[in-house]
Image: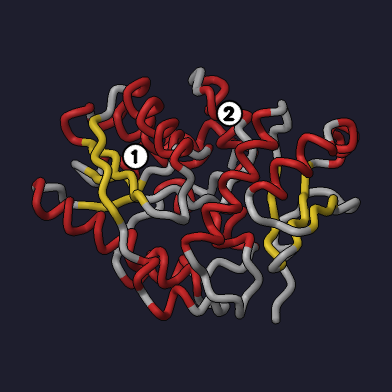
Amino acid sequence: MNTNQKYRNAKEIIKGLKNVVVAFSGGVDSTFLLKCCVDVLGKNNVLAFIGQSPTFPVREIEEAKLLSTLIGAEYIIEETSEIEDINFKRNDKSRCYYCKNHLFSKAWKIAKEKGFLNVVEGSNLDDENDFRPGRKACIEQKVVSPLLMAGLTKNEIRVLSKRLNLPTHDKPAFACLSSRIPYGIAIEIDILKKIELSEWFIRSLGIRQVRVRYHGSIARIEVSKDEINKVIEKREKIAKALLDYGFLYVTLDLQGYRTGSMNIL
């Protein structure tokens, strides 16, 4: 099946839902999904739900608000409470399950209060190949994944996003800040803030794809391989900033950015 047919199928799936709350992060997938929902159902039948949490950078929330407005969708921002959940804080392999449970529970609460029939989210076909404990929460809470159901891949979503003039078509992949902390290390707000500030500073220097992996007193910086030299050139500024944020040692991972690179303790 080609990309255009998958796109049509996704819109048909959305059309059958009548009205939706979109779990919206402002990433590539959820932005494309929100645009599709508004185009198919009309803005009065779509609500973007943005979860606010210490695990999600403030600047990402601001960007999600701007994207919602650009697309023409009403949005609502609500605090999620995963950081108060001991199951989430202990940070085992099911961390994402507990996080998504809180997110979808809040989305459904809003949907019922506002009279919406469905909650949708932006998983794509490529996510099926990754370790995604959050999918369990999605299935349990009957959250619909139109892009996955239509068989759209990440690359196809980027291609279609560019066609629709969405500014996220080439946005680097992003995951919640808790993914920078090794399994077994308790998730604390001060650690998340340290990571958030560090990543934002590095991005402010013109480096697009970055992860600051937390290893106690050590910050392990991952950037795309074509940006490693940029980090080396600006190493003194980066080191000073991260030391000011509370790290004792600042390192650069010469293997470059890759998903799932945290050690399992």
Residue 232, located in which quarter of the rendered image?
top right
> How would you rate the neighbour count of disc 2 (Cα within 10 Å): few for under 14, some for 14-19, many for 20 or more?
many
Nearest to the observer: residue 135 or residue 74: 74
Nearest-to-viewer mark from 2 and 1: 2
Q: State the scheme by which the image is colored.
A: secondary structure
Residue occupied by mark 2:
169
Residue 157, located in which quarter of the rendered image?
top right
Q: Residue at x 56, y 47 (%)?
A: 196
Residue occupied by mark 1:
12
Q: Residue at x 55, y 66 (%)?
A: 132
The percent position of residue 144, horizontal first and vertical second, equals: 34, 55
Visible residue check, residue 5: yes
For mark 2, give the secondary structure.
Answer: helix
- Name above or below for residue 202 compared with residue 188: above
Q: Residue at x 55, y 55 (%)?
A: 177
Nearest to the observer: residue 123 or residue 202: 202
For mark 1, give the secondary structure.
Answer: helix
- The amino acid beneath tag 2 is His
The label shown at residue 85 is: none
- Name above or below for residue 174 compared with residue 55: above
